């Protein structure tokens, strides 16, 4: 398998899938309040994706994942499984949405604050979102994957955080996860060169403490080994000759 350059008609379908994924994050935002369970959020997203968007929640049954979205709270790095546990004031939670529409995937995530959140958690979230956008700004035909990883790592480490190395961004299209792997650390000018028509995700996971993670007995939930807080943001991007197009941009992100 190698990197798939998308045709104009595939790109059009990816735009639609990306927009739908972004709209799920917009839909769910007002529900993320103290007392809601992540199972309730999962059901709201599932029903919206299936009944309103007429699309498919990609995580459901993906390699055995049991739910339609990922909900990763506090020290959970990624792949948190929705359950009957209630969110409480002070929690930070990543909601990761992937939808399939007309055979193509859109993948995006963001952090939400539940009630009142501590300043150190807010700072971690802010730096992580900035790191994503610094990575995105590297994207254009002729740039390398190392340029992206380097920009992200530099911003995280300058701010005394660590970059998770066990999970990465990815190519995306008809498949949820395609080549290439998009590392969130690295050296500028190294790795494969981006070409117009590639579609990738960038999804840095940044920890307040050390970078090490472990996966819980459920086989999915990845947490920081030192139990420090972790944050993540994700967008799906089209590589263009002059730069990039963010396929999962939300209204709140439009200038
Ligand atoms: N959405 C995740 C990603 O960004 C993958 C989740 S896989 C699942 O790549 F099975 F946990 F849903
Ligand atoms: Co992804
Ligand atoms: Co995702």
Image (tube, rainbow, N blue to C red):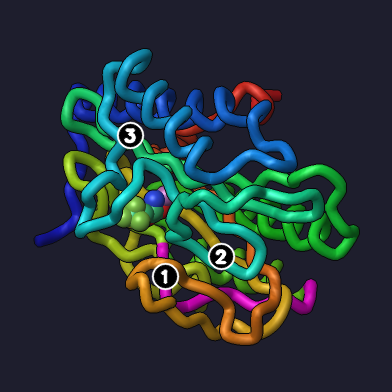
Identify the residue at the far top of this view: 52
55 shown above or below 72:
above
Q: Which residue is mark 1?
A: 167
164 shown above or below 255:
below
Q: Secondary structure at mark 3?
A: strand
Identify the residue at the far front of this view: 84
Is residue 77 visible to us here? yes
Q: Quadrant of residue 247?
A: top left
Q: Which residue is mark 2?
A: 205
Quarter placement of the N terminus: bottom left
State which tag comes first along the sequence, 2 or 1.
1
Q: Residue at x 70, y 67 (%)?
A: 155
Q: Which residue is mark 3?
A: 99
Mark 3 vs mark 2, CA separation in Å: 21 Å
User: Is ligand 1 within 8 Å of the beta carbon of the residue shown at mark 1?
Assistant: yes
Mark 2 closeness class: few <14, some 14–19, many ≥20 residues within 10 Å = many
Q: Residue at x 63, y 49 (%)?
A: 86
158 with respect to 96 (left or right): right
Mark 3 vs mark 1, CA separation in Å: 20 Å
Q: Are marks 2 and 1 in contact (CB under 8 Å)?
A: yes
In front here: 218 or 176?
218
Q: Secondary structure at mark 2?
A: strand
- For the record, the magenta segment spans 159-168
Q: How far across and how far down the image is residue 222, in percent? A: 47, 71
200 with respect to 77 (left or right): left
State which tag comes first along the sequence, 3 or 2.
3
In front here: 151 or 125?
125
State which tag comes first along the sequence, 3 or 1.
3
């Amino acid at each position: 398998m190698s990197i798939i350059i998308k045709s104009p008609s595939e790109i059009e379908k990816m735009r639609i899938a990306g927009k739908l994924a972004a709209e799920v994050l917009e839909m769910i935002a007002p529900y993320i309040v103290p007392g809601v369970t992540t199972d309730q959020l999962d059901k709201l997203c599932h029903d919206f994706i299936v009944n309103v968007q007429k699309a498919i929640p990609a995580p459901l049954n993906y390699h055995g994942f049991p739910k339609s979205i990922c909900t990763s709270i506090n020290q959970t790095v990624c792949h948190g499984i929705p359950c009957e546990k209630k969110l409480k004031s002070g929690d930070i939670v990543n909601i990761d949405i992937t939808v399939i529409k007309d055979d193509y995937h859109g993948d995006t995530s963001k952090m939400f604050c539940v009630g009142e959140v501590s300043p150190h958690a807010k700072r971690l979230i802010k730096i992580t979102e900035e790191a994503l956008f610094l990575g995105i700004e590297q994207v254009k035909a002729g740039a390398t994957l190392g340029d992206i990883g380097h920009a992200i790592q530099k911003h995280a480490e300058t701010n005394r955080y660590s970059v998770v190395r066990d999970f990465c961004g990815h190519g995306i299209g008809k498949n949820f996860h395609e080549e290439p792997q998009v590392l969130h650390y690295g050296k500028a000018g190294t790795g494969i060169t981006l070409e117009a028509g590639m579609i990738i995700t960038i999804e840095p996971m940044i920890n307040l403490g050390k970078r090490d993670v472990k996966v819980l007995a459920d086989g999915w939930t990845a947490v920081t080994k030192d139990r420090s807080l972790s944050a993540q943001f994700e967008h799906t991007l089209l590589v263009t000759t002059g730069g990039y197009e963010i396929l999962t941009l939300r209204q709140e992100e439009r200038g």
